[in-house]
């Protein structure tokens, strides 16, 4: 079957994301900043939010373990949008071109349910998507098979008619395991070349 629809990841595919974007504004010393991100507000700790745990719970546990960093930890929730940087170069234009060509657009993102709405509301590009599966809402995460199977049921398109784009190899492999074509994202130019080969642009 020909590929007819495109499924995007969000973080570091459509928009840059890094906890450093927020905390470099709050911690002046580079060594202290590196230590804080390595030992306190880690990617592994944040992944709990993507899996559906509320920030109130995870922050209380982290504060108990690192009471000297209470103020910085508690800022993660209300200032989460500051951990998201600008759109990845060339990607918004690419989404707009696909939408203008009437290509069905979807997303599967590992993202906290409580953090998603405040971010999504700042980005009108998501209005071009027919559906977005958010891990924290569903309490299912990439690369587990269940989130892709849920997405396929919701999207209403056969897996082999979809290309899935993610910056993490294990997430691409998860999509391929349910029959989607995979693309390991590096940059907009490389992705554009593949979409042209598929006659989507």
Image (cartoon, helix red, strand yellow):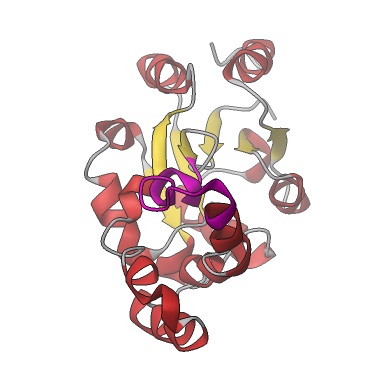
Left or right: residue 144 compared with residue 110 = right
Report the front residue among 48 and 180: 48
Residue 24 among those drawn in magenta: yes
Considering every residue shown, the one lying at the far front of the view is 29
Residue at left offset 34%, top offset 55%: 80
Left/right placement of residue 8 relative to residue 60 reads right
Q: Which quadrant holds residue 99? A: top left
Residue in the foreground of this view, choosing between 195 and 170: 170
Q: Position of residue 67 (x, y in %)?
A: 43, 83
* Residue drawn at x 37%, y 75% as measured from the top left: 55
- Using the rendered image of the protein, determine whether residue 58 is visible from the camera's viewpoint: no
Q: Decide: is 70 above or below 193.
A: below
In the image, the segment drawn in magenta is 17-32
Residue depicted at 39% across the width and 48% down the height: 22
Identify which residue, 148 or 142, lies in the foreground.
142
The answer to whether one can see residue 153 in this image is yes
Front-lying residue, 95 or 187: 187
- Residue at 58% from the left image edge and 19% from the top image edge: 188
Indicate the quadrant containing the N terminus: top left, top right, bottom left or bottom right. Answer: top right
Q: Position of residue 78 (x, y in %)?
A: 26, 62
């Amino acid at each position: 079957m020909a590929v007819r629809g495109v499924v995007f990841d969000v973080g570091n595919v459509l928009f840059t994301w890094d906890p450093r974007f927020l905390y470099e504004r709050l911690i002046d010393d580079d060594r202290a900043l590196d230590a804080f991100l390595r030992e306190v507000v880690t990617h592994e700790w944040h992944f709990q939010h993507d899996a559906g745990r509320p920030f109130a719970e995870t922050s209380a546990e982290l504060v108990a373990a690192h009471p000297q960093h209470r103020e910085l930890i508690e800022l993660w929730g209300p200032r989460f949008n500051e951990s998201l940087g600008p759109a990845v170069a060339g990607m918004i234009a690419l989404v707009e071109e696909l939408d203008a060509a009437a290509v069905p657009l979807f997303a599967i993102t590992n993202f906290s349910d409580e953090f998603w709405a405040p971010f999504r509301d700042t980005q009108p590009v998501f209005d071009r998507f027919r559906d977005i599966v958010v891990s924290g809402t569903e309490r299912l995460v990439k690369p587990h098979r269940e989130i892709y199977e849920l997405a396929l049921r919701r999207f209403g398109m056969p897996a082999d008619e979809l290309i899935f784009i993610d910056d993490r190899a294990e997430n691409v492999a998860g999509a391929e395991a349910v029959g989607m074509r995979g693309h390991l994202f590096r940059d907009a130019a490389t992705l554009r070349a593949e979409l042209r080969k598929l006659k989507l642009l």
